[in-house]
Image (cartoon, rainbow, N blue to C red):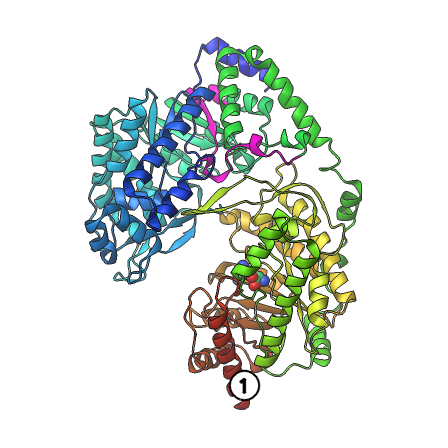
Amino acid sequence: MTATSASGAAASAARTAGATVYGYPRQGQNRELKKAIEGYWKGRTDAETLRRTAAELRRTTWQQLADAGLHEVPTGDFSYYDHVLDTSVMVGAIPDRHRAAVDADPLDGYFAMARGTQDVAPLEMTKWFDTNYHYLVPELGPDTVFTADPGKQAAELTQALALGHTPRPVLLGPVTYLLLAKPAPAAAPDFEPLTLLDRLLPVYAEVLADLRACGADWVQLDEPALVQDRSPAELNAAARAYRDLGALTDRPKLLVASYFDRLGEALPVLAKAPVEGLALDFTGPAAAQVDDLAAVGGLPGKRLVAGVVDGRNVWINDLEKSLATLGTLLGLADRVDVAASCSLLHVPLDATAERGLDPQIARWLAFARQKTAEIATLARGLTRGTDTITAQLAANRADLASRSGSPLTHDPAVRSRAAAVTDADTRRSQAYPERAAAQRERLRLPLLPTTSIGSFPQTGELRTARADLRAGRLGPDAYEQRIEAEIREVVAFQEKTGIDVLVHGEPERNDMVQYFAEQLTGYLATQHGWVQSYGTRYVRPPILAGDIARPQPMTVRWTTYAQSLTERPVKGMLTGPVTMLAWSFVRDDQPLADTARQVALALRDEVNDLEVSGSSVIQVDEPALRETLPLRSAGHPAYLAWATEAFRIATGGASPGTQIHTHMCYAEFGDILRAIDDLDADVISLEAARSHMQVADELAGAGYPREVGPGVYDIHSPRVPGTQEAIALLRKGLGAIPAERLWVNPDCGLKTRGWPEVRAALENLVAAAHEVRSTL
Ligand code: GLN
Ligand code: ZN
């Protein structure tokens, strides 16, 4: 279907397509919200000022959205910290340990749940689906009593109505809320929060009635958990939830929203539900949902909100393609509105703020503000015909052509090299057993060798030095001397402590992805591209915009300097291809596998250069391997195939005597054990201290044949583990992994810790290794 026929369909049906979004970045143009909240925590801002700042930010956002041409604005998506935490408050799911603080002061109690206090632990934080946003995990148990607290939702709705907008409150849906929860500490570990659905629904009914009373015409209930693999029982629960909520008499119209993928078997369930509308994702792999929708007979009599503008990426939309999709969708529902695929929370605010970019390239970018304009343009084209948006279509066509024809996105040298990768390039020249023998011969390490994961404390002085360098207060030579001094200190400490395989400490790195992105061609850095990671923490992911090449070595200078100071091996330290992609905005004009392969080849050159300059041990970190696993298991095999291949391309050129390490954080490896083996690394270090070496058992159980360093020092806590504690963990590890293959190391890098703790903890760790060694 072409754009012309889309406009024809729109005209013949004389329909009006609306334009809307599900959520917007919360922080404000100059990160005002972050400043106000952190000011409140420090006692510099009072609660009233914080509330006023928040209300003003919402007012500005809604006004911008309305001015841009959206007919309906979201409310309730705003948050002081996190929308899942807001939902816990809305349904009264306050853990017992936070009850007193919430009763004493709701705002302080809210922040206590988010961040903990001196005496009380916060809620656990985890990733929101496969994004880099983190939410606070609800804690629910058989004793949980839900009570409706619609205050926040009602207040934002009322505020927007008073300003003359058409608001649509956005709530996290009851099924997803329960599926995202975990058993409360007092509940049985296998307690299933979804069993609380019947208790939760009346509370949602109350909230809905309240919002109706406040003047809501429509309410959106987000159910992104339904795009994941769901059991028949879970699908039944979804059917029951929307049958019951749909049957309520005193309620607004209901729009059930899904995003991040196709609904799959949940689509017929929701299509049949007695609700007035569905919002579906039609971007990327979810584009095929058009066919799914046709297959279930469309949504007769219902409103369809069509997420055709990618809400998770930073690229301009292909407007003509979207108009064609929308044209098809017009025949499948009673009314079609245009939207982004998900909340715009996951993209930065405004691409026009990026003055440092080549203006031509800047035109390829669409952040939240530009996406909003695209949505409004598409809605106008659909309603009034494409001849009313000819200028926008022409500009869009030109920008897309400039992107696809640019030397940045098409570097012939990079492309032909990637195309020429052979099977042999994806494998080390010898199998693991031969390599292990060669490495034993070369490295001559003791049993239970000790090492660390890479970073040492990133001190205030280091950060200041970097800021001074950027501001021109410190020259490049003085900065390098500062870094070298730090490396000397880190190496001296490790030698004195008796660590076997040293690291240089990563003092030169701001961040493990950004540091490399800045040195690779094809990557762009933004100045203002902040995205919320959690609470008031914002990150500026680099943009992987073009073909990736490595003009010169990136780490060799620091590793060789460190190596020049010691006889012991110093580990080279690189970030792996999957993690480079996972923590960046990636290009959408080629498969991820192709992008990963380009990054892998750049890293392969770095591995080679490290080897040539004398490195005998090189670590390639892949902490993101598990976290970018596709939401549906059907996508796992293909993802794991290209992800592990990229790692093997990066490391496959290393000679047999070079020991390749990898590192992963987070304890849940169960579903990627095969993939860990497929990396074909010689040594893997993983988080294990909190789970009492469980991962060692899992790896052993799966027959993992290589060397393993399950962490014996939990670096997420300022606590210093004693020698006896580390000994106990090591003995546990030895129960699963033979001494010839067991390493002794912390759980993760030490950059967030202070020197005093790190010193004591590593000394204890070495003492523990010596003690256990002497008994072998
Ligand atoms: N080498 C990195 C460091 O030590 C690894 C960080 C990570 O696993 N997230 O900081
Ligand atoms: Zn880690």
x then y, percent, for residue 440: 69, 79
Which quadrant is the N terminus positioned in? top right
Residue type highlighted by circle 1: His
Residue 338 magenta-drawn?
Answer: yes
Residue 466 appears left or right of 121:
right
x then y, percent, for residue 448: 57, 80
Residue at 44% across, 25% down: 64
Q: Using the rendered view, name the quadrant where residue 508 is placed.
A: bottom right
Q: Which one is in front, 348 or 739?
A: 348
Residue at 74% across, 50% down: 550
- The region drawn magenta spans 329-357
Which quadrant is the C terminus positioned in? bottom right
Q: Using the rendered view, name the quadrant where residue 509 is placed.
A: bottom right
Q: Is residue 73 above or below residue 102?
A: above
x then y, percent, for residue 92: 23, 46
How packed mark 1 is, by other alpha carbons closer than 10 Å (few <14, some 14-19, many 20 or more), is some
Q: Which residue is mark 1?
A: 770
Q: Is residue 771 above or below residue 157?
A: below
Residue 144 magenta-drawn?
Answer: no
Residue at 66% across, 54% down: 646
Q: Which one is in front, 401 or 437?
A: 401
Give the residue furthest to the front: 473
